[in-house]
Amino acid sequence: MLKWDGHTHSKFCYHGNPAEQKEYLERAIELGFERYSVTEHPPLPDKLVDNPQLMLELAMPAGELADYFAYMKDVKASYEGRIEVAVGLEMDYLFKRTDFSDRIIDNWAKQMEDAVVSVHYLPSRGGAMRCIDYTADDFRDAFLGYYGSIDKVVEEYFNHVEMEIEWAAQLPMRKRIGHVNLIRKFHKELPEMDPDLVRRRLEGLLPKLKASGIGVDVNVAGFRVATCEEAYVPEWFMQACRENGIELVYGSDSHKPEQVGFSYDWFAERAGK
């Protein structure tokens, strides 16, 4: 089976690391990876979140997207014959703003081999969008009082994941749902989520994923987060995906070179690789 890291970042990530792509790829080659997908965050709509400093960290400015694709084209060519470098983006599902994402796809689809599609934002007070994965304190401030309970936040999150799948189904490149259980990032510092609710909502995604041909990013970054300490895809869900013919793709979600290949053995043992 192909050894593939399907979710990684680059120096164009403003909450990542300035290392050149060579450092990531040399480590990937050393670890025996055969395909390496770079899925950088594209630009976001102006003032998507009402925090100017955070906006500067979330994604590259609009003017850098062409630079990113030009850089990755050169990197891809320079590593030909050593490792397959796949160029893509981690597209956000933007509630009521999918027109913004559609324009990115329309302009850049021919340069994209991969799309990881993720939910990072939910509506909060006054309709403002807030990050679900910024800090535990920010999560409490943004969502618990607004929705009324942690389980109502969970319901809203999975409502958006379902809309995300519907939007992603029309993308012309390889696509997969990013860190499907990201809502659990701060679970150790938040009120306990109803496990039966989470399981029910995850089970409800299976027929939608199967029908749309969208894969699943088995994102292991949660193991690196002290408030989570679990993968963002439960083991039972991985098994259910296998039984339904839904593609599972390992994702290190590396934001610095030393994270390349992180917990790959955990994934391989459970994905039948």
Image: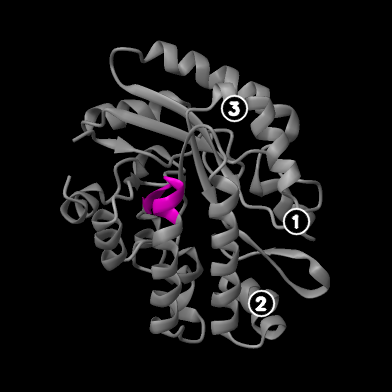
Q: Which residues are magenta?
A: 209-218
Q: Amino acid at mark 3?
A: Ala
Residue corresponding to mark 1: 96
Q: Residues within 10 Å of mark 1 (few under 14, many from 20)?
A: few
Q: In terms of sequence position, does the residue under pointer 2 or pointer 1 come before the other?
A: 1
Residue 90 x, y percent position in the rendering: 54, 42
Q: Amino acid at mark 1?
A: Lys
Tag 2 near tag 1, CB within 8 Å: no
Residue 208 x, y percent position in the rendering: 46, 57
Numbered mark located on residue 150 in the image: none
Q: In terms of sequence position, does the residue under pointer 3 or pointer 1 come before the other?
A: 1
Q: Is residue 46 left or right of residue 154?
A: right
Q: Is residue 240 left or right of residue 88?
A: left
Numbered mark located on residue 143 in the image: 2
Q: What residue appears at the point 80 percent right and 68 percent down from the top-left corner?
A: 127
Q: Amino acid at mark 2?
A: Phe
Residue corresponding to mark 3: 109
Residue pushed farthest front?
A: 211
Residue 63 part of the magenta-drawn span? no
Q: In terms of sequence position, does the residue under pointer 3 or pointer 2 come before the other?
A: 3
Residue 22 x, y percent position in the rendering: 41, 23
